[in-house]
Image (cartoon, rainbow, N blue to C red):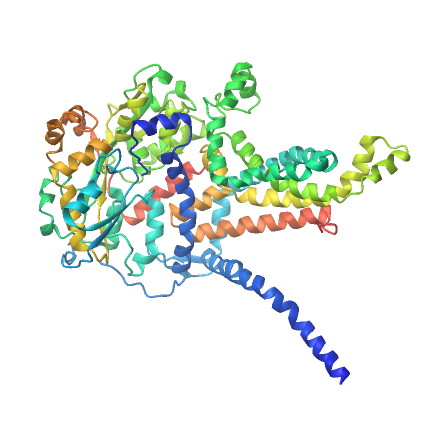
Amino acid sequence: MNRYRINQMRAAQTRAGLNRRQFLGRAGAFGGAVLLTPSLLAACGGDDEDPKGNGGDTEPGPTADPNKSTGDLLMSNWPLYIDPTEDGVTGSVDLFKKATGIDLTYNEDFNDNNEYFAAIQPDLANGKAIKPDIIAPTFWLVARLIELGWVEALPLDQIPNAANLLPSLQKPLWDPTGAYSLPWQSGMTGIAYNIDATGRELTSVEDLFDPEFKGKIGMLTEMRDTLGLVLLGLGKDPSTISFDDAADAFDKIEAAKNDGQIRQFTGNDYQDDLVAGNFAACVAWSGDVAQLALDTPSLRFVIPEEGGMQWSDCMVIPKGADSIKEAAAWMNYVYDPVNAARIAAYVTYNSPVAGVQDELRKNPDTVGLADSELMFPDEETLGRLKVFKALDEDEEAQFDDRFSSITTG
Amino acid sequence: MAGGGEERNQRRGTWQPYAMLSPGMLWMALFFFAPMVILARYALSEPRDRFSGKYDLTWRFENFTEVFDRYGEQFLRSFRYSGIATLLCIALGYPLAYWIATRGGRYRNLLLGLVVVPFFTSYLVRTIAWTTLVGDEGPILGIAGALSLEGALDSIGITTNGGLLQTQTAVILGLTYNFLPFMVLPIYVSLEKIDFRLLDAAKDLYSSSRRAFWKVIFPLSLPGVFAGTLLTFIPASGDFVNAEFLGGPNNQMIGNVIQNEFFVQFDFASAAAISFILMFIITVGVLVYARIFGTDELSV
């Protein structure tokens, strides 16, 4: 799920042409090709005995040893997902380094869940540690990593601020024991549209299939977002869906693709198509649109009346990481409401930390954000959001296969 | 004693070519042959489970038939797109190369340099730049709109729903643009070697200019066209960048399918099988093509 927080300036650049986000996002397709080689070569030793992890265990294993410490810390996260040090304002990474003396390297090199998984798979499958001490995959990949036994149980007693995790995100579907992951940010999937192009407000998933917008509709390559929304439109619950029950939704998407209703399946670059006027409406992520609308006021975001999807990108510690103490310190730091509010004000998604709204209200610069419905959806909206079911390995293969047959048709 | 020396010379004569070839052979062994073996192994294997990345070699030839059945449409589409792009490259590239070779004069090298200039920018960046050019609010549709051509373009299938981005037209034009220099350069080289006094000779024999070109110059330049066709058609068939950025969901090429099989489905067996089928079809195609047009003159 490529979602890039862009500030006003970058949104303006989008209209002018190529910008950093667009380039990063689109170059991601190529990055994957570069990563392919090690994975192929490592995997070709197919006869090696597989050191099986504790895959499939429902009971969390022993927590990572909190005494493992190196003095430095490496985190890989999605681009533009934290407040940077710029314009004379010190960002969270530098504040943390100053406060703790821990040498944190924060890399924005997590561009795509599938590509990242393809890159780390050979090492983790062979019981070798990867470089980052913390990564923040999307919830379904977190579920997969837990299932495969490729992540450490968090030393939660070293992370007292984890108590600030919102009740609705505790022991979630993708991490039923809550022992392995802490959300970095959550967000909503709904419909973004350009009122100038649609000429009317959109309210329903059906609007995406309105022939009036033929060839002007975008959907996401993230299956759970696109399929989830269409399922909701058909009155089905994505959090309990089976492959057979999803057949109607797949058929509906396929038919819309075949007759040219859907112009493209995109990653984060839907933002460019939306701003450039190539899309009249598309499946979209809440925080992006909140940012883009600052510069293009005709852009709107709606959770359809049938419901919307909710997702989280979660911090996990890959198996064998050696800076457990530092990782715990960083997680504790970003779960402090003051620090969480600073990050939330920049990324404009849904912070998983309780107390962020109050913190934003205290500061005159951010008081407006505290009332943002996109950042702090009301109970009624939250009630309409669904999290996609945690698919098991075989089921996921079926879903991915069917969805890919549509997007690469 | 003289005989012994001769023998030594002869012996040196036998190993020296191999010594000179060895860096290239080593390179090919490491980076062509070894990957081929790995790929072949995958193509005949079955995954143990989805994510362990472990494959068991079971000589499963069904991998090939399955992907061929499933992705036949994308194979055909890839060859159709790259075939049209290659023809467009010849149509655009031949006159350009001819003009540079015959009228370039002292600016020849400069003009050839200009043909190559796009290579100074990344392939990826050039293709992404096209998304702006062919976008709905971009200059190309802007011009078409100013000339009130939208309806006409839509009715002859150049645009779809008034759009150019994410259509097959955009993919084919993108391929043409990106591979054009690979067509121009070999054609130029073969044209440059032609003795153009042959044209005068033909005219002395009462040939018209047109006839002289088709009977004399064009056949002599065929090796260049042949080489340019290979250099354009083969990589264009396997390309996935143009379809990714300029095409829509109905315009995906076989390269996109391979990319998807590797990175989304983690089905290395199918991806490897598709790659081999692609290689096989291209190889056979090239052999047939070479048979028809002949490679004897292919000393460009």
Which of the pair A277/B37 is nearer the observer?
Answer: A277
Residue at image location 33% in from the left, 49% down from the top: A117
- Does B233 appear above or below B267? above
Q: Residue at x 13, y 28 (%)?
A: A363
Q: Residue furthest bottom?
A: B1
Q: Position of residue A150 (x, y in %)?
A: 25, 55
Q: Residue at x 36, y 46 (%)?
A: A115
Q: Please tell me in which quadrant of the rendered image residue B169 appears.
A: top right
| Residue sticking out furthest to the right | B205
Whether residue A391 is visible, yes or no, is no
Q: In x, y percent, where is residue A392?
A: 27, 47
| Residue lying farthest to the front in this orientation | A88
User: Can residue A288 be seen by looking at this rendering?
Assistant: yes
The residue closer to the viewer here, A286 or B106, is B106
Compare residues A353 and A98 and report the one nearer the observer.
A98
Q: Quadrant of the N terminus of chain B?
A: bottom right
Query: Is A380 situated left or right of A118 in this image?
Result: left
Please tell me in which quadrant of the rendered image residue B100 appears: top right
Residue A148: percent from left, percent from top = 26, 54
Instruction: Decide: is B95 above or below A31.
Output: above
Q: Is residue B217 above or below residue A129?
A: above
Q: How many marks?
A: 0
Q: Where in the figure is residue A149, as x and y percent of width and height? A: 23, 55
User: What residue is at 11 percent from the left and 31 percent from the top?
Assistant: A359
For residue A89, side relative to residue A249 (left or right) = left
Please give left or right for residue A31 compared with residue B190 in the image: left
